């Protein structure tokens, strides 16, 4: 990758890592579904404007059922689970647990596809990653924090399902930016009746400037702008290099949580993070390939 690619990768990790910080600030004045619905609806508006300016076509009618599924598993469900969890645990810890997404993606792909099987090395990486989860969950019992951590893992599984499901859009010939727009529109539609029923937004008072700005940042920075950078990097650097962002997000989220909210990861959480990142490194394979001799 070029220096500019690495810079974009770092910015992407800050945008996605920052989503945990923004959600925590927004929770100080807004209910969960309001945060999530405004995030996806405003992101849909922004991406729609980008589509109009760039003249990228809208998703075809035949794709919208698939986009509804994508919107459910890649936006509506995981966003709701993660924001709900952050009512009980810090954004830094939520981001660490969210780093298990590639582990779940591997397992879903193994079960649902014929061309992405779990090898011995990938199985070892999955084992290391989930050993990290066990380390973090050990001693938590069944209290609120354990349930919240479970919600984060469920969100990671949802992202894993979405990652496998999303492979069909390339085969359908849909531009990645149009797919991003379609999924946030779909998730907005799915969440809209639930948001009205659960939060009765017309009854909500003014939450304060901080939560409002945080939701705007979630939509504009961590969703719309992040997708634009993501797809630009995907085209320039490829999916393998782009996967490195998985390693950076928990670092960015933990740093921002410490800088702004004085959050700190506990020793068991740091140990779990180390095991998860080690597992991801084994799955990624590049570190091992650099250390092992090549050829006879």
Image: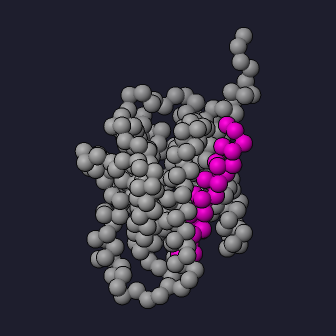
126 vs 23, nearest the viewer:
23
- Provide the major secondary structure of the magenta segment: helix
Q: Is residue 256 above or below residue 208?
A: above
Q: Which residues are magenta?
A: 1-26
Residue 128 appears in the rendering:
no
Q: Is residue 103 above or below residue 292?
A: below
Q: Is residue 258 left or right of residue 72?
A: right
Quadrant of res 136: bottom right
Q: Is residue 152 above or below residue 117?
A: below
Residue 26 appears in the rendering:
yes
What residue appears at the point 72 percent right and 42 percent down from the top-left corner?
A: 3
What residue appears at the point 42 percent right and 34 percent down from the top-left corner?
A: 110
Queried whether the magenta region covers residue 226, the answer comes back as: no
How was this image coloured? one colour
Q: Is residue 82 above or below residue 285?
A: below
What residue appears at the point 45 percent right and 72 percent down from the top-left corner?
A: 35
What residue appears at the point 36 percent right and 37 percent down from the top-left corner?
A: 173
Residue 53 in picture, x, y percent from top left: 45, 55
Q: Residue furthest top?
A: 296
Residue 206 in picture, x, y percent from top left: 47, 88
On-image quarter of the C terminus = top right
Q: Disc count in the image?
A: 0
Residue 194 in picture, x, y percent from top left: 31, 71
Q: Is residue 247 left or right of residue 60?
A: right
Queried whether the magenta region covers residue 11, the answer comes back as: yes
139 vs 266, nearest the viewer:
266
113 vs 121, nearest the viewer:
113
Residue 18 in picture, x, y percent from top left: 60, 63
On-image quarter of the N terminus = top right
Quadrant of res 33: bottom left
């Amino acid at each position: 990758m070029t220096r500019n690619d690495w810079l974009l990768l770092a910015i992407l990790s800050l945008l996605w890592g920052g989503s945990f910080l923004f959600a925590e600030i927004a929770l100080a004045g807004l209910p969960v579904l309001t945060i999530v619905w405004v995030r996806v609806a405003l992101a849909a508006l922004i991406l729609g404007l980008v589509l109009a300016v760039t003249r990228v076509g809208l998703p075809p009618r035949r794709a919208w059922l698939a986009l509804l599924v994508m919107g459910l598993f890649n936006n509506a469900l995981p966003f709701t689970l993660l924001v709900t969890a952050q009512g009980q645990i810090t954004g830094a810890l939520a981001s660490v647990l969210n780093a298990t997404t590639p582990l779940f993606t591997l397992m879903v792909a193994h079960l649902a596809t014929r061309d992405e099987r779990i090898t011995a090395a990938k199985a070892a990486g999955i084992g290391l990653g989930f050993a990290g989860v066990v380390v973090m969950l050990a001693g938590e019992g069944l209290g609120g924090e354990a349930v919240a951590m479970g919600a984060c893992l469920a969100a990671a599984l949802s992202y894993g399902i979405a990652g496998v499901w999303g492979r069909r859009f390339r085969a359908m010939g849909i531009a990645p930016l149009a797919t991003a727009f379609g999924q946030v529109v779909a998730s907005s539609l799915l969440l809209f009746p639930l948001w009205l029923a659960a939060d009765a937004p017309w009854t909500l008072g003014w939450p304060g400037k901080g939560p409002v700005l945080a939701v705007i940042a979630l939509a504009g920075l961590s969703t719309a702008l992040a997708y634009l950078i993501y797809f630009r990097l995907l085209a320039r650097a490829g999916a393998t290099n782009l996967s490195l962002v998985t390693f950076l997000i928990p670092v960015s989220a933990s740093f921002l949580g410490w800088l702004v909210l004085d959050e700190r990861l506990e020793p068991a959480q740091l140990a779990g993070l180390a095991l998860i990142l080690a597992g991801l490194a084994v799955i990624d394979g590049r570190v091992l390939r650099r250390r092992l001799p090549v050829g006879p």
